Amino acid sequence: MQESAVAEGAHTLTKDLHIRRIGPADDAAMADVIRTVMTELGACGEGYSINDAEVDHMYEAYAGPHAGYFVVVTDGDRIVGGGGVAPLEGADDSAGNDMCELKKMYFLPEARGVGVGRVMLQCCLDLARALGFRQCYLETLGSMHQAHRLYERSGFRRIDRSMGDTGHHRCDVWYLLAL
């Protein structure tokens, strides 16, 4: 997929669900999705992404030239999930500027089990490639078994330590993908 298609395109997932780039009016709804899912997972304390300042300002956080965020919307334009990529904060010198992080990919129950995660992940990885990243890092929780299967089917390999300086020290599983 070309960069302009990734940046501008909307993707139909089902007759009721679509993926599009996040807009400024989507911040509150996406923050609610993140907080709902993180609470469901019991990931509410210090060291989890639920506490990141960007949660309330997702559009602005991903509006830069080397990042992007997508939302999953219903036909009624209700946001039920999202995911994005951005440079990995605090990446060591060996990674340089070629490493991104898959960030804040969460879905409400009605967007699960219908292939949304697979399509969202592909949108994010296509954007990462279009932006010139050569590696994609992600961190997750050991309890998110369906997510692990998705990442592994998509070519991510599990690594034994965290990378960068995300502040998410409560995450206990890490993956890396060569783009």
Image: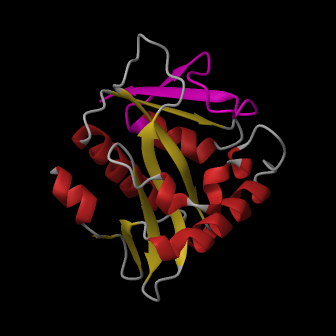
Using residue 52 as the reference point, say whether residue 156 is left or right of it. Answer: left
Residue 33 pos. (x, y %)? 64, 66
Seen at 26% across and 40% down, the residue is 131
Residue 97 pos. (x, y %)? 36, 25
Seen at 73% across and 29% down, the residue is 169
Q: Nearer the viewer, residue 161 or 148?
A: 161
**163 within the magenta span:** yes
Using residue 167 as the reference point, say whether residue 67 is left or right of it. Answer: left
- Magenta segment, prevailing SS (helix, strand or loop): loop
Seen at 46% across and 75% down, the residue is 73
Q: Nearer the viewer, residue 75 or 95?
A: 95
Magenta part of the chain: 153-179
Tell me the quarter of the picture where residue 95 sits: top left
Q: Is residue 1 visible?
A: no
The quadrant in which the C terminus is found is top left
Using residue 99 as the reference point, say whether residue 162 is left or right of it. Answer: right
The residue furthest top is: 94
Using residue 18 as the reference point, say whether residue 166 is left or right of it. Answer: right
**56 within the magenta span:** no
Seen at 67% across and 51% down, the residue is 53
Which colouring convention does the figure follow? secondary structure
